[in-house]
Image (cartoon, grey):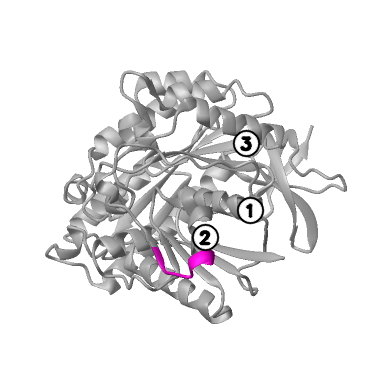
Amino acid sequence: MKRAALHNLGCKVNAYETEAMEQMLVDDGYVIVPFTEEADVYVINTCSVTNMADKKSRQMIHRARRQNPNAVIIAAGCYVQTGLQNASLDEHIADIIIGNNRKHELIPQLHQYLMEHRHITHVADINHLPENYEELYLATTSEHTRAFIKVQDGCNQFCSYCIIPYARGRVRSRKPENVLEEVERLAKNGFREIVLAGIHLSSYGVPGEYDLLDLIELLHGVPGIERIRLSSLEPQVVTEDFARRLSALEKICPHFHLSLQSGCDATLQRMNRKYTAEEYKQGVAMLRKYFDNPAITTDVIVGFPGETEEEFATCKNFLDDIHFYEMHVFKYSKREGTKAAVMDHQIPETVKSERSDVLIDMADRMSEEYRKSYRNRRVEVLFEEQEELNGVTYWMGFTKEYIRVALQTDEDLSNTIVTGRLGKMLTSEVLLLERD
């Protein structure tokens, strides 16, 4: 019995690709075991978004080697892609190295290694590849109710703090008919919610042929799919036409992650972001015009090089004004190979931590206020699993706005949608459902 173990680092796109590689191994006759167990093949899908991500990727590769020195170690993804491009990676860190846009060749590369027992490096210069999208497919996922669907790869933005355009290459989009085929297959296998994901999802499409809205409207007609959720969007994509057309689709989840990074124009300019704080605010206003109390979430970087106390105060006031459902707060971390890493006026770690603590406290307060705003509202909840809270076992699920909800019942509610009103808060993050 051939055994394989996989470990994913990084984003939801990486997670999708890891599950696709897992499916390839299953189709090739492998039994999947936990990464902590001994296996014949270990696959580490690496991340390179920060220097720490590089370090964790190296650690997981070495850990696999220690667990079974005789196993085939496969390192894939962003860390090995950027490391080889910059000549900063030992080419023999793993038995097989597979770069981005080459993961679909996992099984042929593995078979070749098992026949020849010679190191394989399969990494192309991703910045000079033809604009072809790497097709990967899923029929099932590790989750039972929600499936992430990768529809786009690459990024053309070149934010000054980000290495991803060098790791993922230029924007490439999956053909709508191929996405439709996969979603129909997942729906037949019982999935009721899909999440459209990409490295820069807002760039999805081919100008003059189709765009992200066209894809969403196509998928909206798939029987069995009850919810369509979007991963991170850029604020520029939210025009009145975008918001209006989305609001006409009942399966769309009014949960929008609009990437911000800073609420100060001077900081945004140094980051090489392509919008102003006012343009961001207009996008949020457009969503709130067409959706009733939508969940708006975002990412914020504190301590970016040159961020003064005045700039931080401007950002803080902007965040308070927008009033998000959730904010993911990150302390700026140098990423070698980016423009920001060599900028003047790097911020001390103590200052970054102080500013981060301020925004995290603000985020916690706003999240609780948003959840409380939904008390006594009638909602639909897609239940996923059981969990114990305060000594009581509940079924746990999420509303379309991604508010976590609990219901105490003896029924099996897995992958079931239940309607009711939201009652008291069981914890600061969980509301109780009062069933219809």
Q: Earlier in the sequence, mark 2 or mark 1?
A: 1
* Amino acid type for the residue under numbered disc 2: Leu
Q: Residue at x 71, y 37 (%)?
A: 189
Relative side of 347 to 94, left or right: left
Q: Residue 321's quadrant in the figure? A: top left
Magenta span:
114-120
Q: Earlier in the sequence, mark 3 or mark 1?
A: 1
Residue nearer the viewer, 365 or 132: 132
Instruction: Measure the C-alpha gap from mark 3 to mark 2.
Output: 33 Å
* Amino acid type for the residue under numbered disc 1: Asp
Q: Residue 382's quadrant in the figure? A: top right
Q: Residue at x 67, y 56 (%)?
A: 29
Q: Residues within 10 Å of mark 3 (few under 14, many from 20)?
A: many
Q: Secondary structure at mark 1?
A: loop
Q: Residue at x 53, y 35 (%)?
A: 229
Give the numbered dot on residue 28. 1
Q: Are marks 2 and 1 in contact (CB under 8 Å)?
A: yes
In this figure, which residue is indicated by the disc labeled 3?
193
**Looking at the image, residue 264 lies above or below residue 87:** above
Work out which quarter of the rendered image holds the N terminus and state it. bottom right
**Looking at the image, residue 155 lies above or below residue 389:** above
In this figure, which residue is indicated by the disc labeled 2?
110
Between marks 3 and 2 in the image, the one whose residue lies nearer the viewer = 2
- Outermost residue toward the right in this view: 410
Q: Can see residue 8?
A: yes
Between marks 3 and 1 in the image, the one whose residue lies nearer the viewer = 1
